[in-house]
């Protein structure tokens, strides 16, 4: 389930990246003539919000128009998706999200929109693995000790999530199976409020996106035990992988992306895609994402995927 949607997204987004230069028509020359809205269906301050603001701030230089981030929360993200899906297909409303909001939510919540029929992809944005993190008061120095503590205290342990069916929730279920225990999951309206309660000690544990957790790990506000990837991240080489730490195979990486309402003209999608490519090529943007533990996608790999798809089709 996790691999197929990402592969399909890569192929479709690569198609946007590979669109040939179109004839100079009035509509293409005019767009954009006013501000563009990124609809984020999660709260301000969370991982999606940060990615949207970093990429949007650089895209405005290329597009020469402001890019506003509108946080539309509720319904586990379905309300924000519906808001974007029903917008005019003119390039002025863009849906920004990730694997949770645009894939997993459709399988766990009543959908007000359909990502496959209501949207066209614009571009793949950076991705990041997750971190197993706890409040500072947890008496465990490494992942094996943490797993033992969790099993011994499972009746009172509380694990925060960004909502039912989100990546932190799904990874929490995988992790509790690895531990052989049952946790009490506490659902929040996004990763940012969950992180606030973890730092204040209101909950014990989170499996959270690197981009959201690393600033707090660096500040000493929470403790990190392992990264959900096959290799350590350059941002924090001292944090072991789940394989090294005692939970082998517990992998998950969350990708981000941009979409527009279906039937948005292809020249407008190409214009937006070009602005994303330029933004992701900017050194300051890449540095900012790297500092958050985010990996910028390789554009040559995206184009290769599209080329192979055309040859096989």
Image: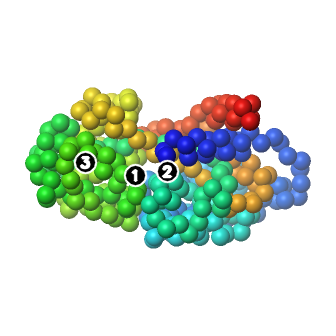
Tag 1 secondary structure: helix
Q: Does 33 sit left or right of 214 as displayed? A: right
Q: Which mark is residue 99?
A: 2
Q: Bin the neighbour count of mark 1 within 10 Å (Cα to Cα): few under 14, some 14-19, many 20 and up.
A: many
Measured from the top left, where is residue 173 in percent x and y? 30, 50
Q: CA distance from mark 3 to mark 2?
A: 21 Å
Of circles 3 and 2, which is in front? 3
Measured from the top left, where is residue 187 in percent x and y? 32, 63
* Pointers 3 and 2 in contact (C-beta within 8 Å): no
Tag 3 secondary structure: helix
Residue at figure coordinates x 31%, y 46% from the top left: 174
Q: CA distance from mark 1 to mark 2?
A: 8 Å
User: Which quadrant would residue 262 be assigned to in this image?
Assistant: bottom right
Residue at figure coordinates x 30%, y 32% from the top left: 248
Residue underneath mark 1: 167
Residue at figure coordinates x 34%, y 54% from the top left: 169
Q: Which mark is residue 176?
A: 3
Decide which of 15, 299 is in the foreground and name it: 15
Q: Earlier in the sequence, mark 1 or mark 2?
A: 2
User: Which quadrant would residue 81 be assigned to in this image?
Assistant: bottom right
* Pointers 1 and 2 in contact (C-beta within 8 Å): yes
Q: Is residue 285 visible?
A: no
Decide which of 118, 287 is in the foreground and name it: 118
Q: Earlier in the sequence, mark 3 or mark 2?
A: 2
Q: Would you place residue 264 above or below residue 110 in this image?
A: above
Q: Which mark is residue 149?
A: none
Measured from the top left, where is residue 288 in percent x and y? 48, 43
Q: Is residue 263 visible?
A: yes
Q: Does 42 sit left or right of 305 as displayed? A: left
User: How are the residues colored?
Assistant: rainbow
């Amino acid at each position: 389930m996790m691999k197929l949607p990402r592969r399909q997204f890569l192929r479709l987004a690569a198609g946007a990246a590979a669109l040939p230069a179109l004839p100079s028509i009035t509509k293409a020359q005019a767009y954009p003539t006013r501000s563009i809205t990124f609809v984020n269906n999660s709260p301000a301050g969370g991982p999606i919000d940060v990615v949207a603001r970093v990429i949007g701030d650089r895209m405005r230089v290329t597009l020469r128009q402001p890019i506003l981030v509108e946080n539309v929360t509720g319904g586990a993200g379905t309300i924000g998706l519906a808001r974007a899906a029903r917008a005019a297909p003119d390039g002025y409303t863009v849906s920004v999200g990730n694997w949770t909001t645009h894939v997993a939510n459709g399988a766990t919540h009543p959908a007000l929109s359909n990502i496959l029929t209501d949207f066209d992809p614009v571009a793949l944005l950076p991705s990041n693995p997750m971190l197993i993190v706890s409040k500072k008061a947890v008496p465990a120095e490494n992942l094996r000790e943490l797993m033992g503590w969790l099993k011994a205290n499972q009746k009172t342990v509380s694990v925060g999530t960004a909502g039912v069916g989100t990546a932190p929730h799904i990874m929490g279920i995988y992790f509790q199976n690895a531990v052989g225990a049952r946790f009490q999951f506490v659902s929040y309206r996004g990763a940012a409020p969950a992180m606030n309660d973890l730092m204040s000690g209101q909950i014990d544990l989170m499996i959270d996106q690197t981009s959201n957790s690393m600033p707090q790990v660096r500040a000493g506000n929470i403790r990190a035990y392992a990264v959900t990837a096959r290799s350590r991240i350059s941002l924090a080489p001292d944090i072991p992988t789940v394989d090294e730490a005692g939970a082998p195979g517990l992998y998950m990486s969350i990708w981000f992306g941009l979409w527009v309402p279906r039937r948005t003209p292809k020249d407008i999608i190409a214009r937006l895609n070009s602005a994303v490519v330029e933004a992701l090529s900017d050194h300051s943007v890449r540095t900012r994402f790297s500092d958050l533990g985010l990996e910028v996608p390789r554009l040559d790999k995206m184009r290769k995927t599209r080329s192979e798809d055309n040859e096989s089709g």
